[in-house]
Amino acid sequence: MRIPRIFTDSPLLVGSHCELDDNAANHVGRVLRMQQGQELRLFNGDGQDYTATIAQAGKKNVQVEITGAETNRTESPLSIILGQTLSKGDRMDYAIQKAVEMGTTVIVPLATERSDVKLKGDREEKRLRHWQQVAISAAEQCGRARVPNILPVMTVAEWLHYSQNANLKLVLHHRTEQSLNTLAKPGSVALMIGPEGGLTTNEIARAEQSGFLPVALGPRVLRTETAPVAAIALCQWLWGDIGN
């Protein structure tokens, strides 16, 4: 039987008993319906994976005994900050899920001129909580040591300021001949992904003025949820931990 891997915000210490946080306890107790004596694998973002045994299990509260720890080596040496334009339906969920699987460090939802999604107030807070849970689930599934943060929605101006310290800043743009494999190896990358209709000429110009290089991934136009997966995979292949 496969041992479930669960993220928890709780501190974890070998030899101690730990009360799982509400989200983790709900998943273990209500969704998986696990019982006392069953084994778990836990992580909390400190770079370790912990083995644990359920000491007490209820629908709302789960207590575990931490029995061991080992270093998790799944994090990429390449830091990737993804600026992903908001999109409708499950396309944003898909982009976030796959970006986490591919090793993204931080994900920033972007409000661009052609974005067909507008989020404010309680609606934005609700979506951010949902997207963070998508990221947690993806990290649990793919074996990552850390869960990328989903930051609040940013305007283009806010994003350009936030990402200014990245070693290499890229804006995906199919109307250019610049390709990734001609660039020197960076320590960190900021990727800017536009909406279905693409970034406007003004947005691309502002990005270039802020040090972003326009790059193309090939002759075909990719969907907004496909582009980050392809771009991150190529960055990890060239400069990260895929294929090494």
Image: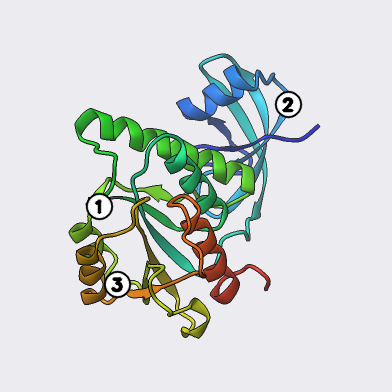
Q: At label 3, which amino acid type do we have? A: Asn
In the image as oriented, which residue stretches furthest toward the top?
59
Label 1: state its secondary structure: loop
The quadrant of the picture occupied by the C terminus is: bottom right
- Which tag, 3 or 2, sits closer to the chain's start? 2
Please give the residue where the numbered disc 3 appears in the rendered image: 165
Residue occupying the point 20% across, 32% down: 121
Q: Are marks 3 and 1 in contact (CB under 8 Å)?
A: no
Label 3: state its secondary structure: loop
Please give the residue where the numbered disc 2 appears in the rendered image: 38
In this rendering, the label closer to the viewer, 3 or 2? 3
Tell me if 215 is positioned left or right of 94 in this view. Answer: left
Q: At label 1, which amino acid type do we have? A: Thr
The total of numbered circles placed on residues is 3
Q: Are marks 3 and 2 in contact (CB under 8 Å)?
A: no
Residue occupying the point 48% across, 28% down: 23
Where residue 126 appears, as percent x and y from the top left, is 32, 30
